[in-house]
Image (cartoon, rainbow, N blue to C red):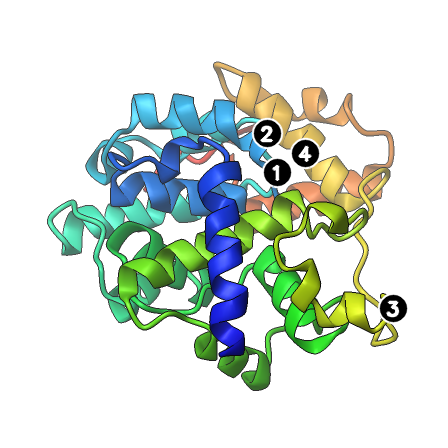
Amino acid sequence: MVEETVQQPIIDWYATHARDLPWRRPDASAWAVMVSEFMLQQTPVSRVLPVYENWMHDWPEPANLAAASPADAVRAWGRLGYPRRALRLHAAATAIAGRHGGRVPAEYDDLRALPGVGAYTAAAISVFAYRRRRAVLDTNVRRVLVRVMQGREFPANTVNSAEQRLAESLLPDDPARAAVWSVAAMELGALVCSAASPRCDRCPVRGQCAWRAAGFPAYDGPRRPTQTYAGTDRQCRGRLLGVLREAAEPVPRERLDEVWDDAEQRQRALDSLLADGLAERFDESRYRLPETH
């Protein structure tokens, strides 16, 4: 079967080439997997590792994080980016402590009901922590499948039902093997079948790859979203949040004004931090990280 000719070489490749990452080790808890999944969203492993290690040292269980303040979570998140993830992880830990006895739930629907846990994250936790048989479609897996199986350079901007069915059709029947297949395809996409510089000479399924057989046709679908940072509201938010994160006391408005020249953009960014719960007004003229749950 086509599925088996693709599965086994990738699983064998993974056995030899997988990175030693703490959330993949046999003794990694479901909480460790969950923390890694939150941190790895749109963030490379190299940036995640030091933050992850400190986080797990300080809060080895959901109840430990739930007992801390949201401000503690945002400070520990540091410069990892997209800091709302820290608040969502804190909220999820609080829910786990309150609803599930401090144990990360195993069932997909229970995971989806947690604050900040979307479809991908719920699938990843259920598969990688509990060996449930479910398709895990991150950016790397999607790119591998669409190239190898469909002969296209990149998948659509969002997951569609046909792509979901393809991923499910490739899952091995055995749940434990299916979990290995999912992480192996993910690792292949991260290390070999990358977006910008695929290393096809190192690919274990280059002989079965439909994209290679078609002559590597370039992507011709809708424009793929690109991210900019310099000069954006996101950069301004980061500057303001950095001041709040590093301060031991509530910060006067004047200190925030010093880090960004454009007054209109600065106000817009501050308003968005307040709306997102990443900052709170301490009094008429001072601001701080969120201290209340």
**Disc 3/disc 1 C-alpha distance (Å):** 29 Å
Q: Which of marks 4 and 3 is nearer the N terminus?
A: 3
Question: Going from the N terminus, do you reach mark 3 or mark 2 first?
Answer: 2
Q: Which of marks 4 and 2 is nearer the N terminus?
A: 2
Mark 1 touching mark 2, by CB under 8 A? yes
> Looking at this rendering, what residue extends furthest in the top direction?
248
Residue closer to the observer: 238 or 54: 54
Left-right relation of 267 to 142: right
Q: In the rendered image, which residue does mark 3 sit on?
A: 215
Residue corresponding to mark 4? 238
Disc 2 crowd rating (10 Å Cα; few below 14, some 14-19, many 20+) is some
Mark 3, other Cα within 10 Å: few <14 / some 14–19 / many ≥20:
few
Label 1 packing within 10 angstroms: few (<14), some (14-19), many (20+): few
| Residue 288: x %, y % from top left | 51, 28
Q: Residue, x 27% and y 37% (percent of image)?
A: 26
Q: Do the residues labelled 4 and 2 touch (CB within 8 Å)?
A: no
- Outermost residue on the left side: it is 101
The numbered dot on residue 44 is 1
Question: Which residue lies under the disc numbered 2?
Answer: 47
